[in-house]
Amino acid sequence: MTDSCCCPSEAGNNVCDLPAENFQRPPREVNACPRCGKIGKPVQGQTVKSLLSVSLRQVQDVHYLFCRTQTCPVVYFSADGEQAFTVAEVRERVYQKEPQARDVFICYCFRHTVGELRTGTPEVRTAIVDNINSGINAGQCACDLRNPQGSCCLGNVRAMIKRLEKQVAVTT
Ligand SMILES: [Zn+2]
């Protein structure tokens, strides 16, 4: 049994959200965001270090989690809830906190924005997904260092395309 999903390590496969076949993920620690109370997504230490805009002297050798609650200002917090870093202390704008903002990246490695997906034709959207997949397969991504969630963006991209397709179906 492999201990990783389909993505390479630079895609943040240790903390990936995508389902993997024949791979049982270890049970996650139950870690709630100190601000909103929702369970966070585990992130690796290098993700927190590369994305924070504050002195890394504040980063400790503990487990950090990513808060994906849109309305919550916390981006990273320590598993014990003692420490929390907000959007103001992160170098990138965070897709999960501003999913409607056109100029926010949804794919941080290959620089695709929310607006690009929203205004794109179905062909453009397919081309974006293909571009991301090709980049991952070529080992050119660095989701663990670039994407605030610390793992591959493909799940977010596919979910957004599905939502956009649904909206079109409703309005036409
Ligand atoms: Zn939160």
Image (cartoon, rainbow, N blue to C red):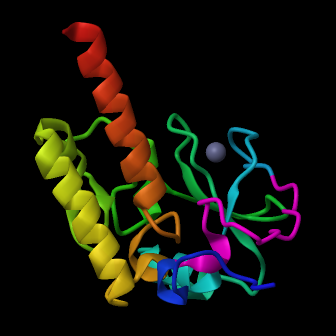
**Could you tell me which quadrant the N terminus lies in?**
bottom right
Note whether residue 40 is visible.
yes
Task: Tell me which residue sits at (44%, 81%) in the image.
Answer: 145
Place of residue 73 in the rendered image (x, y in percent of width and height, measured from the top left): 52, 45
Answer left or right for 133 relative to 48: left
> Is residue 137 found inside the magenta-colored segment of the image?
no
Q: In the rendered view, would you say 18 is above or below 145? A: above
**Could you tell me which quadrant the C terminus lies in?**
top left
Closer-to-camera residue (32/11): 11
Place of residue 34 in the rendered image (x, y in percent of width and height, measured from the top left): 75, 48
Q: Which residues are magenta?
A: 12-31
> Is residue 16 found inside the magenta-colored segment of the image?
yes
Task: Tell me which residue sits at (75%, 83%) in the image.
Answer: 3
Answer left or right for 68 relative to 63: left
Task: Tell me which residue sits at (80%, 69%) in the image.
Answer: 25
Closer-to-camera residue (101/85): 101
Place of residue 37 in the rendered image (x, y in percent of width and height, measured from the top left): 76, 40
Q: In the rendered view, would you say 171 is above or below 69? A: above
Name the image quarter holding residue 169: top left
Closer-to-camera residue (140/144): 140
